Image: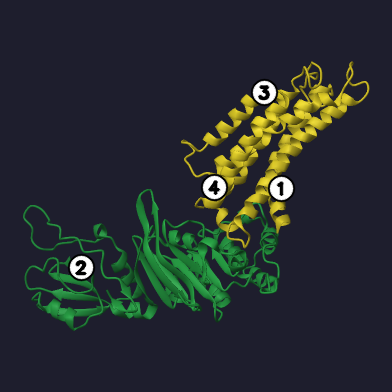
Chain colours: A green, B yellow
Amino acid sequence: MNDADAIVTRRLTKHFDGKRVVDSLDLNIKAGSVYGFLGRNGAGKSTTIKMLTGMLRPDAGEAYLLGEPVATLRPETRRRICYLAEAHPLYGWMTVGEAVRFTRAFYPATDGHPGWNGRLCEQILDHFELPRRRKIRRLSRGQMAQVSLALGVAPEPELLILDDPTLGLDTVVRRDFLESLIQIIHRAGRTILFSSHMLGDVERVADRIGLMADGVLRVDCPTEVFRESVKRVLVDFAGVPAEDPDVPRLVSWRHVGPTLELVLVGYDDAQRAAVEALGPRSVEVVDLNLEEAFIAYTRPARSLPAFDFRPVKKSIPHPEPAPTDGPSFTDQGAA
Amino acid sequence: MVRALLIKELREAAALLAVALAAAVYVLTDLTGLDVFPLQEPGGGGYPFIGDVFSNRLWLVCGVLAVALGLKQTAWEETRGTYDFLLHRPVPRRVLFGVKLAFGLVSVLAVGGLTVLTYALWAAAPGSIPAPFRWSMTAPMWLTLAAFPLIYLSAFLSGIRPARWFGTRLVPLAAGGAFATAAGASVESWDFALFVLPATAVTAAAVIYFVENRDY
């Protein structure tokens, strides 16, 4: 760990009811970066974030925020961190104005910190046209997200941890929220960890992504690198396609008629040779967009569409399930 | 910051406190012969603090308040997910919960204490009762108040301790309530406090343990 890391985890692990929901997570998020934390529902994103914020205690491993162990995070450090929890929990009986006054009380100006930025808070509330006298419980889900954002940003945090902040918002509100988020929080030196299962949201905000699947961090690299590196290779056969192809850095595979469809990390000479060794009639390499790459990494075998157009007599044979524990993908290349 | 937390606790508990105070007023008017509520049949009978039903009614009013307040301050916060908002504030967890506990204990004792004091003042006023009154007669009632922190903390522990509601969740409340009731029924005078105070201390230690160590 060094000073340039805003978030560090070392073999962070958590079990629920005997199931390992976060498995030996090693994460280094550099200060000043916007990190998109991706994964399907239940992948372990929220559990990881709750461990990072000290709401859950890890079963093993350790986590550091702004250089300090989460387990012993001092209030002075915590005030430099904003955490927006999933679904934006706020006190429904408070009005918007009362919520502001209540939260402001925790952020007095001190020698090392300017304290609550009331002007910024008011600007955000004005921007979203949030009535100060309206009870929180009378607000829409989108408005609650907006109040949460104002309360989270007003203390001028250095590190923002946002757990699926656009969950449940309709398209227009989500877009508006994200654009405001980008404008408000993307300031030099500010680190943002942004979890979501909305690819478009992450693509707009993050300069680096991590992808969790079944509690394991499968991808950790710049967004562009991920998007450009994952390839779909369509291998066409004259006869029956090969089963269980042995190709390096294979993420997933499936049959589509006489074609074997492979999703690979990169497409180098070794992979090309392995594909040629299958004896194909033709090979076509297709770039994937972020969403397709995300799906290839996170789709479980049981949900792979398996259509077989070969003539059948009595029953339709099912192809072998595609491997789902494909290669991990980091800056250092495929494992 | 502590002030903001206290105001929050007061606002959230206001309805419960109002109901408890109304119940206390009802008990007092009933026992003192003031016919102010409809359908009320005043006159609890007996001699104040010695041979009347004041003790039973005090247990009912303050016991219910202690249970309701302890659960509201914990389980209510959990079901609404607001721990995620509150516990990330830059304040040690023990301060956040310390304010909750202090508010709850003071509220329960204040309602009980005011009820006892009001009844005692009425009894002490010349002409209220056809017999002499000594303040020493109120001592058992003041000691009885020592049971309510145990009941409150047991309810708080039930709310803060992770467990299934249809499992062991309410075991601390049942145990604390049973202990306080049994001690109150079978032990006289200062012995009562000597039984209840150690149990209160153990329950408070358990509350602190779960506050500091549980997952939220």
The residue beneath circle 3 is B187
Percent position of residue A71, x then y: 51, 61
C-beta proximity under 8 Å, tags 3 and 2: no
The residue beneath circle 1 is B10
Are the residues under marks 4 and 3 on the same chain?
Answer: yes
Q: Quadrant of residue B83?
A: bottom right
Q: CA distance from mark 3 to mark 1?
A: 34 Å
Chain containing the residue with disc 2:
A
**Amino acid type for the residue under numbered disc 3:** Val
C-beta proximity under 8 Å, tags 3 and 1: no
Give the side of residue B172 with respect to residue B44, left or right.
Answer: left
What residue appears at the point 56 percent right and 31 percent down from the top-left corner? B174
Chain containing the residue with disc 3:
B
Percent position of residue A307, x then y: 18, 61
Percent position of residue B62, x then y: 70, 33
Q: Earlier in the sequence, mark 4 or mark 3?
A: 3
C-beta proximity under 8 Å, tags 2 and 1: no
In this picture, is A76 found above or below A5?
above
Q: Earlier in the sequence, mark 3 or mark 1?
A: 1
Which label lies toward us, 4 or 1? Answer: 4
Q: CA distance from mark 4 to mark 2?
A: 48 Å
Which label lies toward us, 3 or 1? Answer: 3
At mark 2, the secondary structure is strand
Q: Quadrant of the N terminus of chain B?
A: bottom right
The residue beneath circle 2 is A253
Q: CA distance from mark 4 to mark 1?
A: 23 Å
How many numbered tags mark residues here?
4
Percent position of residue A154, x then y: 64, 70
Q: Earlier in the sequence, mark 4 or mark 1?
A: 1
In this picture, is A136 found above or below A289?
above
Residue B210's label in the rendered image is: 4
What residue appears at the point 47 percent right and 60 percent down from the top-left corner? A51
